[in-house]
Structure formats: C-alpha cells, structure tokens
Amino acid sequence: TVPNKAVVTLQPNWSEIYRGEAITLRCEIKDGGDSEWEYEWRTTSSEKPSNQNELSIRSVSASHSGVYRCKGRKKSEKSSTDWSDPFILTVSDKAQSVLTVSPSWLSAGASVTLNCSVKDQSAGWRFYWYKTVPDPSDNSYSYELLPGSSSGTEQDSYIVHGQTHTAGYVCRAGRGDPVYYTHYSEPQFIWTGGQFISCHVIIKFNLFTVCDQYTVY
C-alpha cells in the first residue's frame, strides 16, 4: 500500500439528500500530487460504480442509499491506498414545504406575510411563492407565481402588500442544478371582509389541492 489516504466526499455537501436530487460522489486521494490514479469502488447500494474518481447520479432514489468506499491505485505502480472510511448515503423521501401566513384575518388593504419552511432549512434552498387560481371547470386550483418569484427568493418570507380580497397561497422550495423542487405546500387562505371558510374535506390531485366540502361563516 501507499501512505496516501482515500476519502469519499459528497457534492453538494448537504446534510440531507432527497429522492430526485442530482449528486456526485467523489473519491479524493489526499496528497495525491501529480500521480495518475485508477479508482475502485465498493458499495452496498444498487449502484454499479465505474473506475472513475467521480460517481454522478442524476436522480437519486432509495436504492442508492448505502455505504460507499473507494481506493486509488497508481497507474505507474502496483501499489494502492487502503480502502477509505465508509461514507453512508441516505436518500430521504421527497421534501415537503410548509406555508404559514400572518395574519390570516385582516382588513382590506392590509399586508400579509408568507413564511415557507423545509425540514432541512439551511441547505441552499430558494423559495417560490404562488397564488391559487380557481378553475371552475373541475373545481380545482392552478398556481400562479407571485411577482419577483420566478427565480426563487433567498428569503423564506414574502410580503403581499395591499391585500383587498380573500385569496389562497402556496409555496415550494428548490435547490441544485438542475433545480430540485419540494412538494407544494398545502394552500393557506387569507380572509378579508369578515369572511371565513372552514374546509372539511380536502382532495389531493397531482398538482392541486381541492376543498371539496366547506362552511362559510
């Protein structure tokens, strides 16, 4: 063996990886210098790594979860490094955004603050803000991006100024390249003019959430 140490690293180096994200596992040889290396991987996952130093996965799934180890071998010699320490990759289910609004009751013309949160809040998320647009043809909603939100915002809050009527809002978060998006949040409604609607039965479609039974107070 050679004294150089092999290390498995993850890019992006986020504390939690979600199903559908793009990642790269890299085998780095410490103090490898200008030597040319060949690489060997071992893993308990379903992935079948090549002999390259990088293992890129465009869309990770639960089957990629497992232990990854690597080692390097100098092309000019027969000697190699020891196996790296194990790197454990855990792929979580698709992330869910949660939207809160304050206040939920307000006078016409007042401002309302939207807050969007994700479980792994500090890991490079940008936030996308939407207004619900009712579709009377099938009693569902589509989502319309709010101004300044097309590329996402670094801030996890968004202020809607001059709210004059009852409206619904949703959010989601995204990160990476290509952008990985969380699930849309559940819609939150802002009530104006003394109107309040209590939703009893919620039906979820692929991109929509519908209030099927409600009471107006």
Image (cartoon, rainbow, N blue to C red):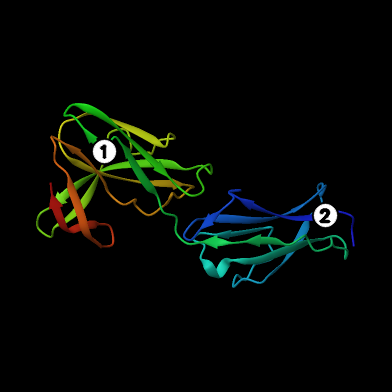
Quadrant for the N terminus, please: bottom right
Q: Secondary structure at mark 2?
A: loop
Residue annotated with mark 1: 104
Tell me which label, 2 or 1, sits earlier in the chain.
2
* Residue type, label 2: Lys
Rounded to the nearest whole Å, what is the CA distance between mark 2 and mark 1? 57 Å
Residue placed furthest toward the front: 217
Task: Say which quarter of the image contains residue 192.
Answer: top left
For the point 53% across and 67% down, which residue is it? Answer: 62
Residue annotated with mark 2: 5
Is 18 displayed left or right of 162 in the figure?
A: right
The x, y position of residue 141, in whole percent, is: 19, 53
Mark 2 in CB contact with mark 1 (< 8 angstroms): no
For the point 46% across and 59% down, which residue is it? Answer: 20
The x, y position of residue 113, in whole percent, is: 32, 33
Q: Residues within 10 Å of mark 1 (few under 14, many from 20)?
A: some
Is 164 displayed left or right of 157 in the figure?
A: left
Residue placed furthest toward the left: 137
The image shows a total of numbered marks equal to 2
Q: Secondary structure at mark 1?
A: loop
Is 112 displayed left or right of 216 in the figure?
A: right
Is 187 displayed left or right of 82 in the figure?
A: left
* Residue type, label 1: Ser
